[in-house]
Image (cartoon, rainbow, N blue to C red):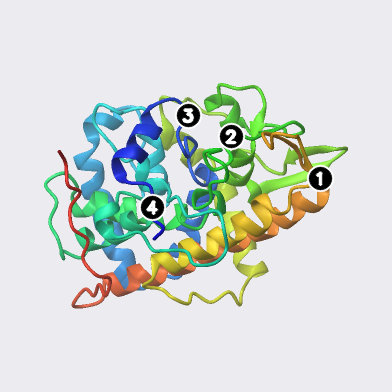
Amino acid sequence: MRRFISAPVILAIFFGGIAVHSASAWDSIGHMLIARIAWEQLSPEARAGVKEAAAKFNEQKAEERGTEDAPYDFVTAACWMDDIRGMKDRYDFGPWHYVNLPFNQDGLPVPADEEGPNVIWGVRRTLDILTGKVESPEISREQALFMLTHTVGDIHQPLHTTNRGNDYGGNAVSVRNMALSSEEKMFNKRKTGNLHGFWDAAYRRGFRDGTVSVLYDMPVHDVAKPVTGHLAAMELILREADALRKKYPDLDAPDVDDPSAWAHESHVIGYDLGYGGLTDVSATGRVVILDERYTNAAREAAEKRLVLAGNRLAALLNRVYEKPAVNTLQATPPISRP
């Protein structure tokens, strides 16, 4: 019987050297695009609910944000789980961003809730807290809302559900012909890009003169003021979110209550295209050169995943803020700590 990597092993991998998914799933623009796409579809009740939650969340996090940074709103708070990645003494959410599904298309076992944390578990857990199905002494309902917003996005990134040959979701696969985005230049310690990072921003990658380029970029900002930086990109977010919704108006949101199905969708894309679409690969598989065909196919796949994530997030939140709030997902038990 096939089993998933246990939580202790995942944590050991995460904190011991290269993380299985050391980069954020989508980059900050990607997460904000998903939130904006969702916002456009929220009911008046849901909009009022998330606005109230954002106000309380800013009060709760005032100390860690500092007085000079801007307050979060629904769209910018989608980045909070990545903004706090340097606060390891306070937060331990690394494994919530991904799940290790076996490297095949068929027979994918769903990880049992007690084998969390992972991104499937995280979506269920944060929804349980948000709807009051379970209580957490560490996570408020307001924090759960924005963790849900983030993890729903993460689960739609194909290389956050796919891991080949212990390459850490493509983090250990260098891309020789990839130009780095401004965020990658700020946070990537290596001068070359990697396959996981390519997919983090695949929705805005292009191909020109043999190089994988960035079609549009994040405004330069002070890394000590992440929310101010997110807000600086808002004009871009509004434009691109609107363009994506118009480009893919017929993407429905089936399985709205099944995050394991979302992870399996992402995994198949990661298997078939993320790894299966590679052509120019070194003998070890740890160095690749991407071509125009791959770049364009990945961009289209990633665009659709962003839109689906936004549609599904909106459907979830509209149901949460109905009267009474509804959560049909099975409650998740807390993580067992030694």
**What is the CA distance from the residue labelled 4 to the residue labelled 3?**
19 Å
- Identify the element where label 1 is drawn: loop
N-term-proximal mark, 2 vs 3: 3
- The amino acid on which the numbered mark 1 sits, given as a three-letter code, is Asp
Residue identified by numbered label 3:
18
Say which label, 2 or 1, has the lower sequence index.
2
Residue placed furthest toward the front: 1
| Image quarter in which the C terminus is found | top left
Label of residue 4 in the image = 4
Q: CA distance from mark 1 to mark 3?
A: 27 Å
- Is disc 3 surrounded by few (<14), some (14 to 19) or many (20+) residues within 10 Å? some
Residue at 35% over, 47% down: 96
Cβ atoms at labels 2 and 1 below 8 Å apart: no
Whole-percent x and y of residue 323?
A: 20, 78
| Amino acid type assigned to the residue bearing label 4 in the image | Phe
Asked if marks 1 and 3 touch (Cβ < 8 Å), the reply is no
**Badge nearest the viewer, 4 or 1:** 4
